[in-house]
Amino acid sequence: MPTNKYYVSAIAAFVIWGFFSLVLKPLHLYRSLDILFYRVFYAVTLLLVINLVFRRKALKNDLKVFKSFNKKARRSTIILTIVSGFLLVTNWFLFIYAVNHVSLKSASFAYLLCPILTTILAFFILKEQLSKWQWVAVAVSLASCAILSIGSQKDLIYSFFIALSFAFYLIIQRKNNQFDKFVMLTIQMVIVAAVLIPFFPKYSGSIPQESLFYIMLTFIVVLFTIIPMFLQLYALKGMKSSAVGILMYINPMINFLLAVFYFKEEIDDIQIVSYGLILLSVVIFNEKYLFRRNTIAIEKP
């Protein structure tokens, strides 16, 4: 099977995110908003240091590209980048809250809905075309989500908004991909931090004193924020949003296995069947890549 650097980057990002609950669960006694505050501020500080000290050339190149745009293109780039930041902070807060205060399965369900929403949005907004087998895969995954949603209305509400925020984020990154992805990630994080700073004095709790909090936070920022975010943004340089979106199923599949075998959450036959259908949909969607030795949904950057 031929490998592709964009395809591998997308898979790696979602595999990493699949294990996110391992560092979130130990922090379940901390407020979701506090985890979000410290995650963002820590990440922004680290990203700024990396870019200003080690990546000045990339910063200068991106500034040159931005200055080459006409007025309309500049305005569009600024708006898309700001909206990306808002979508990111919304998605992170809802995900953290769902994991620690609703259920791990509700967070997993969000990333079952997200590939479907991403594919549909990409079709209508980006005009990305899908083969008949890829539409079959979307239909299979939609059926599995419908089965899982039975009797879980509360989980479904949280899951839908988590999924929608991230689906729109992916679509915007596909449209706004003329710049260095690490620089773009830094700018987005700066925007997120700017949104949160005014709320920090009033809504943050007392400063955490336990070393566990800062150890887990370091893992969250480096291993579960900067690295997978960069990998995902890089993948979107050469892959369609729908293809990246469908690979997102790797994330909830790992979450589901952790919920059952590690966190010992209850499971029933319906969930087993549904996740089996999801795995089948991933195979069907990628059948060209898996069985015909062709690279699916890869575009030259």
Image: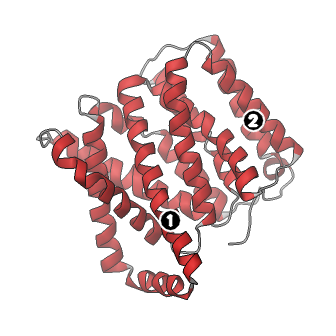
Q: Position of residue 192 (x, y in %)?
A: 36, 56
Residue name at image x 55 percent, y 81 percent: 71
- Asked if 211 appears above or below 61 in the picture, the reply is above
Write down the residue under mark 2.
Answer: 281
Distance between mark 2 and mark 1 Cα atoms: 35 Å
* Mark toward the viewer: 2 or 1: 1
Q: Which mark is residue 70?
A: none
- Asked if 53 appears above or below 114 in the picture, the reply is below
Query: Quick one: 161 or 6, which is closer to the camera?
Result: 161
Q: Is residue 51 left or right of residue 286?
A: left
Q: Quadrant of residue 171?
A: bottom right
Q: Residues within 10 Å of mark 2 (few under 14, many from 20)?
A: many
Q: Position of residue 133 (x, y in %)?
A: 86, 42
Where disc 2 sits, the SS reads: helix
- Asked if 9 appears above or below 256 in the picture, the reply is below
Residue name at image x 78 percent, y 33 percent: 139
